Amino acid sequence: MWFEVQSTLVRTSVAVASLLAAPLLIAQQSVDVPSTPSIGNLNLNQVLANLEERDAQRAAALQEFESTRVYRMKYRGFPTDRDAEMVVKVRFHAPDSKDFTVVSETGSKFVIEHIFKKLLEEEAEALRNSRHDMALTRDNYKFELAGFESDASGGQYVLELVPRKNNNKFLYRGKIWIDAKDFAVVRIEGEPAKNPSFWIKKTDIAHSYKKVDDFWLPAENHTESFIRLGGKATLSIEYQDYKITKSKPTDVAKSSRKSSARSQSLSGAEPAVWTAHIVALGTP
């Protein structure tokens, strides 16, 4: 039984990670987008059109960056507790290359080899081969404008996501928060549209982003998987020490928006990969 639970955790984490690594490709529509939108007063189509435009610009402008990640997992439950941590250096080269260098490893070898490193493999694969069945598009999701939350930075539009196909394990249901000035995804909360296994009772996903120079990049990913046998696996990824090593001004990249808007990953894309992996790997 324990072997079956282990296998389930790996499959679940991989599935969750795939969710959050998928490209955010919103189908273009003929929408009148204000050149200087009034904060908090846009309708759903205008919010999505601004998000598409700004993310395409940022994706075209970002050429290379470096960062450090800290992967942590805590499992509490049958048959024994497990903890692990792995520190990784990351180098991104546009358009579809990420180099990972493991700096340190501590704790459970099973978690490190079958969860952390599997997450890296799946992320690199998802970056090279975009899958439309797990992208954040109108084909895969129904979007609803849930409201607007004001804060000192200007506020965020809150959108609800409902998957069109509940049997697709690479989709999730939940909410995204979009910065009202930059039109970038700043937060994602949700759960997989389809439970990846009988042994996983529930999985909660939370991802946040932070602004680095002109770009919105992942800040933290947090996933909790609850096991039917009574255990809980918590997987977190912290993103540190970002350094943008090569980029173009976003206003220059704007000229390439029309040709790249359908193919570039947007700020909300990477979470799809994390969700898929985290759920699958959430149980050591």
Image (cartoon, rainbow, N blue to C red):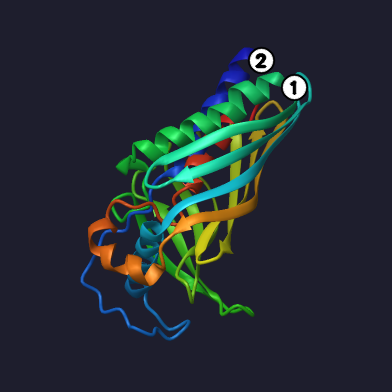
Residue drawn 55% across and 65% down?
213
Label 2 Cα neighbours within 10 Å, binned few <14 / some 14-19 / many ≥20: few
Q: Nearer the viewer, residue 230 or 56?
A: 56
Label 1 Cα neighbours within 10 Å, binned few <14 / some 14-19 / many ≥20: some
The image shows residue 216 at horizontal and vertical percentages of 52, 61
* Res. 50 image quadrant: bottom left
Q: Are marks 2 and 1 in contact (CB under 8 Å)?
A: yes
Asked if 270 appears above or below 179 in the picture, the reply is: above
Mark 2 and mark 1: Cα distance apart in space: 8 Å
Asked if 117 appears above or below 219 in the picture, the reply is: above
The answer to whether residue 250 is seen in the rendering is yes
- The residue labelled by disc 2 is 2
Disc 2 marks a residue whose amino acid type is Trp
* Residue 104, disc: none
Dot 2 falls on a residue whose secondary structure is helix
Dot 1 falls on a residue whose secondary structure is loop
Residue drawn 23% across and 58% down?
259
Residue drawn 40% across and 68% down?
250
In the rendered structure, which disc, 2 or 1, sits on the residue that comes first in sequence?
A: 2
The image shows residue 244 at horizontal and vertical percentages of 53, 56
Quadrant of image for the N terminus: top right
- The residue labelled by disc 1 is 78
